[in-house]
Image: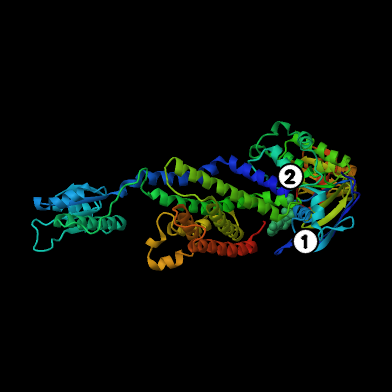
Amino acid sequence: MKPVITLLGSLLRQTVRNRQGLFWTLFFPVVLMIVFSLLGNTQNRVNLAIVAPTPTSSAVVRIVEHSPFFHIRTMRRQAALNAVRSGRLDAALLVPAAPQSRTTTLVLRYNPANSLSAQQAVGAVQALVAQADLALSGRPPRFRVQATPLVHARASTYLDFLLPGVLALMTMQNSLFGIGSGLTRWKEKGILRRFRVTPLRPLQFLGAAILNYLLVGLASSAIIIGFATSLLHASVDVPLGPVALVLLLGMGCFLAFGFIVAGVSRSQEATIPIINLISFPMMFLSGVFFPVSSLPKILTHIVDYFPLTYVSGALRGLMSGQLTWHDAAFRGDLLGMAVWLAVAGVVAARVWRWE
Amino acid sequence: MGMSGKSLRLEGLTKRYGAVTAVDRLDLTILPGIIFGLLGPNGAGKTTTLEMIEGLRRPDEGRIWLGDIDLIRRPAEAKRRFGVQLQTSAFFELLTVKETLELFHSLYSHPLNVGDLIRRMDLEEKRNARVGGLSGGQRQRLALAVALVNDPDVVFLDEPSAGLDPQARRNLWEVVLGLKAEGRTVVLTTHYMDEAEVLADRLAIMDHGRVLDEGAPRELIARHLPAAVIEVDRSTGIAGDADLPALVRIEEREEVTALVTRSLEDTLTGLVAWANEHGRQLTGLKTRSATLEDVFLELTGRSLRE
Ligand SMILES: Nc1ncnc2c1ncn2[C@@H]1O[C@H](COP(=O)(O)OP(=O)(O)OP(=O)(O)O)[C@@H](O)[C@H]1O
Ligand SMILES: [Mg+2]
C-alpha cells in the first residue's frame, strides 16, 4: 500500500505542476460558461411586434404592454413580418382594423426556426388574449391566477442547464485524454518499463494512476461548480454524495474507454483521432448543450444508451432538483453507467498492453 | 549488501522476433563480484539479453539461474536483487531528482539513503531540479542512482556511458569500479573499447545473438592477435598491392591503413622493401600492439560504431 500512496503522491504532484494541462482542463469549460452566461438571459422575454391600426384594439395592446413577459413594439405590418422572418423578433401579432361579427381573429405570425421562442411566444400570447377577452367582456372571471413574483427569485438560465452538461463533458474529456496522453506517453517513453523492473506490481501502478485521475477529476469538477455558482451566479443544487457518485462512475467508464484506446493503438498520435471519434458524437448528442429530447426521435433511441447521456442526464436531474437518490430514473442512469463500466472494463483488461 | 556469492547462469537463452533471432542459444556464466562486459555492434542482441535476465522480456527458450534460483519461474527474486539501468530510461519529467529517488526508494524494503546516492552520483546541485531539465549526462547519472537505490547484488548497465563527456565517463568508471569494490556484480554493455578494457574483468563479444568469444580482455587480445598493428597513411596505396610476410589482414580505416601482423619485424621489413621498390613514402608510419578494437574487427568483421 505504501508504494501506491507514494506513487499517487508523485502523480498528483505532476498533475499540479503541469500548468499547461491544468489550463486546458479548466479553460474550455470556463469559457463556455462565461460566453453562455453573457448571452444568457435575453431569451427570457418574448420580442413581440404589434400591428394595430385602429384605436379599437388598443385594449389588447394595453394588456399586452403591461405584461412582464413581453418586449413590445408597435410596427407597420410589412416591417413586422420582415423582422420576424429574419429572426430579429419572435412573433408579430396582427390585430384586424375593425372588430368582426362575433369572434375577432388575431393573427400571430411567428418564426418556426427558433422553436423554443416560438412556443413561448404562442403560449404567452394565447394566455394574454384569453385574459384580455375576459376583461373586455366585463364579466367577472370564474378563476383567477394571482401570480406574485418571489423576492430574491431568479430566472432559470441556460447556464443552469449548461453546467451539468459541462461537468459531464469534462468527465469524458479528462478521462479519455488523461489515459490517451498521460499513460500512453509514459508507456511510449519507457517510464512504465522502468517500474516493471521494480517490485511494484502492474496493478499497483494502474491503481495509483486511476486514483490520480479520479481525484483530479473530482477536484476540477469542484472548481468548475464553484466558479459557476459564485462568479457566474448559476443556481443549481449540488447534493454532494450523489453528484460525486455520478462523476466517479462516469470517469470510471471513460477511463476504461481510454485504456481500450491506448491498448489497441500503437502510438500516442494514433490515440488522439480515436478519442475524438468517440467523444465528438457524444459531445454534441448526449445532452451537453441541448436536451436529448430535442433530437429526432429515431436518434434518441440510440443516444439514450450513450454513456455520456447517462452522465449528463443524471447530473442535470440532480442539479436541477428533479432527481434524487430515490428516483427510478436516477437509478436507471447509474445502472447504465455501471453496465458500461463493467463491459468496457473487461475489454480494457483484455486489450491493455504494457509495452 | 553485496557478496551474494551467487553466479548468474544463462543456458541456451533464445529470443526471436519474427524472422530475426535476436538472441540465439546463448550460454554464459557470470561469476559474482566481477565486472562483466558485453561488447557487440548495433543489433547484436546485448539489450535483449540483459532485458531477458531482468525479467522485462520472456525468453522463447532457455533458462536463467541466479545460483539455484530459476529467475524465469521466480521473477520477483530478480526484481528485488537486481539494479537496472535501461538503455533508454525515462522518468517523470515534472518530478525533481530527489522526488524521483524517493519514489523508487519507497518501492523497496531495504533501500539505500537517498541523500547518499545523490552525493555519490554528484547530483547535489540538481537535487531540486526537475528531471525534464536535466542534461543527457545528468539523466544517465540519475538512472544509475535509481539503479542502486535497492542496494542490489547485481547491477545491469546498458550503455551507461552513452552521451557522456570524457570527464563524466571517467567519473562513471570510478563509480563502476566502486560497485565492484563493494562486492556487487556489474554487467554492462558498451561500444567503447577503452571502457571495456579498463573496466571489464571478463568480456563476451557478441554478434547476431551469439557469443563469438569470451574471456579477460588481455586473454582475448592474445588469443586472436598474437602480435601487433602497423599503421600508415592511406595515401601510400599499400592496401591494393601488398603481399607482405606474416600479414594477417589489411584494413582501411578512414585515413589510415592498418596492417595486422603476426610478426612485426617480418612485415615491417617487407613493407620498407615494398616502399623502396615502388618509390613510395611511408607517411604516418606507426606501430602499436593490438587492441580490443582489432580483436573486435577480427571477430565480427565490422567496426563497433559503423
Ligand atoms: N521489440 C522488438 N521487436 C522486434 N525486433 C526487435 C525487438 N527488440 C530487438 N529486436 C531486434 O533484435 C536484435 C537485437 O536487438 P538489441 O536491441 O538486443 O541489440 P543491441 O545489441 O542492444 O544493439 P545496440 O548496440 O544498438 O543497443 C535487433 O536486430 C533488433 O532489431
Ligand atoms: Mg542495446
Residue A302 sits in quarter: bottom left
Q: In the picture shown, does residue A216 fall above or below B167?
A: below
User: Which mark is on residue B78?
Assistant: none
Picture disc at residue B104: 2
For residue B63, which quarter of the picture? bottom right
Which residue type carries mark 1? Answer: Pro
Q: Position of residue A179 (x, y in %)?
A: 59, 53
Instruction: Name the element at disc 1.
Output: loop
Q: Nearer the viewer, residue A195 or A328?
A: A328
Please tell me which residue lies in front, B69 or B167: B69
Single out the mark in the foreground, 1 or 2.
2
In this picture, residue B148 sits left or right of residue B129: right
Q: Which residue is mark 1?
A: B59
Q: Position of residue A284 (x, y in %)?
A: 43, 57
Say whether residue A24 is visible. Answer: no
Above or below, comparing residue B204 to residue B63 in the picture: above
* Applied colour scheme: rainbow
Q: Which chain's residue wears label 1?
A: B
Q: Tell me which numbered mark, 1 or 2, is placed earlier along the sequence.
A: 1
Task: Give the left or right position of residue A16, taking residue B89 as reference.
Answer: left
